Image (cartoon, rainbow, N blue to C red):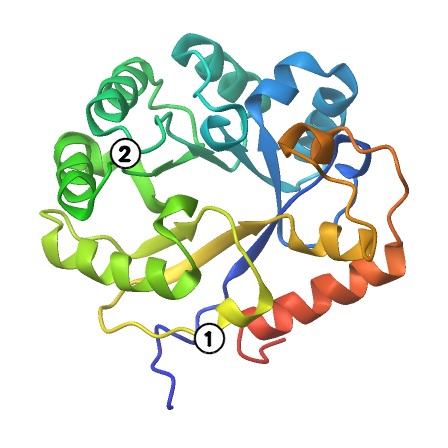
Amino acid sequence: MERNETDRRRTKLVIDYPIKYVHLLQGDITFALAQLYKKEPVYRDILLHLKNTGREIMLDNGAWEFGKSMNVVDYIHICEELQPTYAVVPDVMKKKKQTEKVALSFLEKWNWQNKTKLIFAPQGKNETELFDCYNNVVNKYHIYLDMVGIPKHIGKIVNRVTFTDHLYEHASVKFERVHFLGYWNWEELAFQHKYPWYIHSLDTKAPVKYAYRPNNIFSDQMSYYYAKEKIRIEDFEVAVNHFQYLLNGGAE
């Protein structure tokens, strides 16, 4: 299959690190959780150092990992202090009305002089709710939103690609850049779509987890972030390089 010009744009790899390894610089962007930033001084200090040395950071409100989004005022405070390159607008997993409420509250309070680029991930229990959630928020604030985020619970990459095409069809304000929140396995990297949007970035824990194999030490989200065992750095670097190669169709 021939790749069009949109497909040739390089997709950025966003790595979600355990606290112990958040200082590593593999991948294009470091994924950060606001709750851990607030709670863990070492995590916070390293992220501030990375930001000050030019590393791109994507801050997330933790709705997937913690089961609920961070308080809007607290989240804005962290955004102002860290000044991440990107921040995911607060949302509530699979809940349309609650997501609209918390997202609009955040956007109404947001200081538009902040240069952080905002990612909005619509939520809902079916496509109709997801489309409505997107339109109800984006219609009002589209000039301030940089990307649309596609939630992990939509399914595998092929499902998210299909969903994003459907969202594009139903979007009253069309989008160009897309971020995929979360990633499952290598086989998902084969995808195609018919509309002129592209995957700007994708976040994942996969290279870190690969470096811990064959021992599966993660029983839940927090066991991942608080892991104390050493990863096999060489295996991790191989996984990162392989991931980036596949993600960009063999691009450098």
- Residue 179 located left or right of residue 239: left
**x and y percent of residue 226 in the render?**
76, 28
**x and y percent of residue 214 in the render?**
82, 57
Figure quadrant of the C terminus: bottom right
Looking at this view, is 173 or 103 the one in front? 103
Is label 2 in a helix, a strand or a loop?
A: helix
Residue under label 1, please give it.
190
The amino acid marked with disc number 2 is Tyr
Residue 195 shows up from this direction: yes
Where 130 falls versus 71 (above or below)? below
Is label 1 in a helix, a strand or a loop?
A: loop
Looking at this view, is 80 or 23 the one in front? 23
**Tag shown at residue 144:** 2
- The image quarter in which residue 91 lies: top left
Task: Assess whether mark 2 and mark 1 are in contact (beta carbons under 8 angstroms).
Answer: no
Residue at (24%, 36%) from the top-left corner?
Answer: 124
**x and y percent of residue 128 in the render?**
13, 44
Residue at (71%, 62%) from the top-left corner?
Answer: 240
Looking at this view, is 26 or 158 the one in front? 158
- Residue 140 located left or right of residue 153: left
Local crowd size for mark 2, using a 10 Å CA cut-off: few (<14), some (14–19), many (≥20): some
Residue at (11%, 53%) from the top-left corner?
Answer: 170
**x and y percent of residue 56 in the render?**
60, 42
